[in-house]
Image (cartoon, helix red, strand yellow):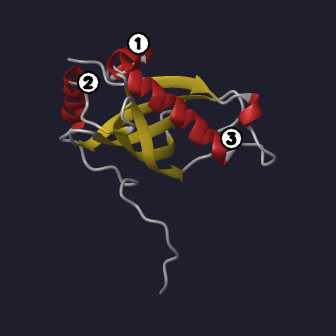
Amino acid sequence: MEQSFHYKDRVLPEWVDYNGHMNDAEYNRAFSLATDAFIDYIGLDETARDNYAYTIFTLETHICYLKEMHEDEPFEITARVLDYDAKRIHLFLTMKNQHGEITATLEEMLMGMDQRTGRPSAFPDDVEQKIRSVYQMHADQEHPKQAGRTIGIRRK
């Protein structure tokens, strides 16, 4: 069976804020680094992006902060493709601490772009096949609780 995507890192000292934990912007940085690694994982590393004149843009993100992370604490980010079409990926990333506890999630919409035209474009065939493979790996799992949430103040 194919290995699923994993990105590992640790909380750097410069990522810690005045509250003594990982700053909210740094969660975004960690997820962004993981997204870049995921893009490489599906076959769009720097060489492929140059060869295809193709890249991926982020259209929208939503982070849920669930547990504090502290300086030098290791973490792992996994990815799940919730949905995809010819040129978009609905991606869900989960960050866990060294104890396997979910510390944050990021839901994002990615768009494939033709670099020559600057317009959205279908994924190259081999990239689409890899996206499909990642999607199928988790297709039978329950929808993540944090996915599809909206922000608002609940009124009684």
Local crowd at mark 1 within 10 Å, few (<14), some, or many (≥20)?
A: few
Q: Pick whichever of labels 1 and 3 is earlier in the sequence.
A: 3
Asked whether disc 2 touches disc 3, contact meaning CB atoms under 8 Å apart, the reply is no
SS assignment at label 2? helix
Above-or-below relation of 85 to 43: below
Q: Kindly state the secondary structure of the residue where label 3 is placed.
A: loop
- Labelled disc at residue 127: 2
Q: Rounded to the nearest whole Å, what is the CA distance between mark 2 and mark 1?
A: 13 Å
Q: Position of residue 106 (x, y in %)?
A: 46, 45
Tell us which disc is closer to us: 2 or 3: 2
Residue 97 visible to an observer of this rendering: no
On screen, residue 4 versus residue 85, left or right, reads: right
Find residue 47 and name its label: 1
Tag 2: residue type? Val
Asked if one can make out residue 133 in the rendered structure from this viewpoint, the answer is yes
Which badge, 2 or 1, comes first in the chain's sequence? 1
Q: Nearer the viewer, residue 10 or 116?
A: 116
Q: Nearer the viewer, mark 2 or mark 1?
A: 1
Name the N-terminal-most of marks 2 and 3.
3
Query: Residue drawn 36% across and 58% down?
Result: 148
| Dot 3 amino acid type | Met
Residue 147 appears left or right of 73: left
Q: Are marks 1 and 3 in contact (CB under 8 Å)?
A: no
Residue 78, percent from left and from top: 41, 32
Identity of the residue furthest to the bottom in this view: 156
Disc 3 target residue: 22
